[in-house]
Amino acid sequence: MALFVLGGRLLKCRTDIKRVMTATQAYCSSVAAGRQHVNGVDLYYEQTGRGKHAVLLIPGALGCTRTDFGPQLKSLNKELFTVVGWDPRGYGQSRPPDRDFPADFFERDAKDAVDLMKALGFGKFSLLGWSDGGITALIAAAKNPDVINKMVVWGSNAFVSHQDLKLYNAVRDVSRWSARMRQPMEEVYGTEVFAKTWEAWVDGIAQFAKRPGGSICLELLPLISCPTLVIHGEKDPMVPSIHPQCLLKHIKGSQLHLMPEGKHNLHLRYADEFNKLVEDFLQD
């Protein structure tokens, strides 16, 4: 099996690679792209749809709008939703600045996400967060209860275990990856910048293992009050079931939906099923 890294996580199977690499094809002509100055940086975003319900897509580590959310920007119901994808600071087309990973980088991303939506004129909105983007969403929802309507997270964790840490360190050196593994991110960042940024991400995520319980945002979970759907692919090679169970336990009133065949990139490989699940939850 080939291993593929996207959004800060490993994906197994060559078919996953093909699907991810084709996930950025043909956007609807109604997509508007631009940059918004937020918290001292220019953040790139794409917006589509004209629905009253605004939804922000939050990508994973090193991910961006076009690598992580092609099927969602293309196919989520544009009559019901206004969908915004963005590249967090230092990722994708939100460069400069170069990406760094201080102790509060998730909190910084969460503030950027909320402030971007406010700057775009959305007073209240929902969050869809994948992988590291799910962590960002959790923090944003906990700290902005009056702003967040609903939230969907998948492939996300609120703490870093020693098992997680070993896996991150095992993939630190991208020169040991296959060319197929490196290609998507190298197309975005270039060979040297990708290698440097990835290693910095490993160090950045590893620092949480030194906290009590490996907490990234465990203490914030009880503060989340918006309706929350946690989706978990039961074949996700990067996120053991203990992580979605933790979210379910600590987020009051949250729901857990299991996808038996889902891996880490379930929203790309099973886009139709995922999109319908999300649309039904957001409309309920």
Image (cartoon, rainbow, N blue to C red):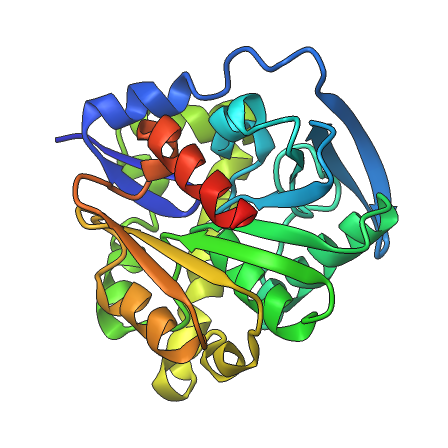
Q: Is residue 165 visible?
A: no
Residue located 47% across and 49% down the image: 281
Q: Is residue 246 above or below residue 222?
A: above
Q: Is 163 placed left or right of 110 in the picture?
A: left
Residue located 52% across and 30% down the image: 72
Q: Is residue 140 above or below residue 33?
A: below
Residue located 74% across and 35% down the image: 44
- On the image, the x and y values in percent for residue 112 come to 73, 56
- On the image, the x and y values in percent for residue 210 come to 40, 82
Residue ranking furthest to the front = 284
Q: Is 209 placed left or right of 144 in the picture?
A: left
Q: Depth check: give the residue in front, 201 or 155.
A: 155
Residue ranking furthest to the bottom = 212
- On the image, the x and y values in percent for residue 11 come to 27, 38
Specify the quadrant of the image occupied by residue 104: bottom right
Specify the quadrant of the image occupied by residue 46: top right
Specify the quadrant of the image occupied by residue 259: top left
Q: Is residue 51 visible?
A: yes
Say how many tags the image has: 0
Quadrant holding the N terminus: top left
Q: Depth check: give the residue in front, 189 or 220.
A: 220
Residue located 29% across and 49% down the image: 171
- On the image, the x and y values in percent for residue 160 come to 35, 71
